Structures are given as C-alpha cells and as structure tokens.
Amino acid sequence: SLLRGMANLPFDDERRAHAMDLADDVLEESIVRRKNDHAADVLAAAIAYTIVFVDRLPLTQAEVAASFRVPTRALRARFSELRSRLGILPGDARYKHEPS
C-alpha cells in the first residue's frame, strides 16, 4: 500500500526511504490496527502525509488521501494519532529530507 500510493506523490528516493523508516517505527510502537485492507491503506496514507508534514511539502491531506484512495477524514485521524504517539514535529530530524 505504501509504495503504491507514494508512486503518485512527488517523493524522491530519500523521502521514500524516510517513509519506510517511519513505517518500521509504527510497527515497533504497535500503532497498527489491522482490521481490513482499507485500514492498511489509511495507515500508509498517514505515513506518507507525515513525510509531507515533516518536510513541509506543498501538498494537502486531501491530495495525499486521493493518492491512496482513502477518505481525507480517515487520513487526518490516523496522522493525528501517529503524530501524537511518535512525537512528530515539523522538520523532525528522524524523517526529514536533507537536500544534497
């Protein structure tokens, strides 16, 4: 879900790698709720939006949600949870893209 959705976003290889690192952190913190395949898509969208948030990219939650074909309100709720549970801030060094 994550790789498929990110293919529609302007993410370079480094941003994709940061998203995968974040996904690993989400799994380690047991933030995953596997109810159905839609829940996995929403989580993937929230992870991608977290990278947008950290790097301050000019994309909206609705644009990211559309790339993953999930409701914006569902992305918003999961993003809020990830941000809170992992203490994510804009420019967070754990996931921030550093231009070469």
Image (tube, helix red, strand yellow):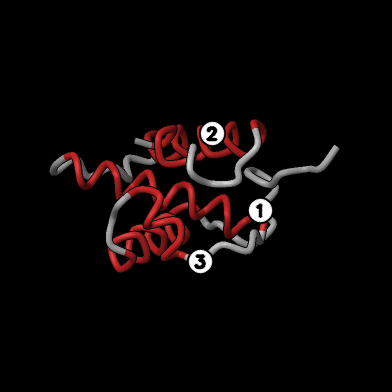
At x 40% / y 50%, what residue is drawn?
67
Q: Earlier in the sequence, mark 2 or mark 1?
A: 2
29 relative to 66, above or below: above
At x 53% / y 57%, what residue is drawn?
87
The residue singled out by tag 1 in the image is: 92
At x 38% / y 57%, what residue is drawn?
65
Q: Secondary structure at mark 2?
A: helix
11 relative to 14, above or below: below
The residue singled out by tag 2 in the image is: 21
**Residue 64 position in % (x across, y down):** 45, 56
The residue singled out by tag 3 in the image is: 60
Q: In which quarter of the view is residue 30 placed?
A: top left
Q: Earlier in the sequence, mark 3 or mark 1?
A: 3
Q: Secondary structure at mark 3?
A: loop
Label 1 sits on what residue type?
Answer: Asp
Q: For the C terminus, give its image quadrant.
A: top right
Is 2 or 69 nearer to us in this picture? 69
Left or right of 39, for residue 66: right
**Residue 75 position in % (x across, y down):** 35, 60
Label 2 sits on what residue type?
Answer: Asp
Left or right of 38, for residue 30: right
Left or right of 100, for residue 52: left
Is 64 or 33 nearer to us in this picture? 64
**Residue 19 position in % (x across, y down):** 53, 39
Left or right of 1, for residue 63: right
C-alpha span from label 3 to label 1: 19 Å
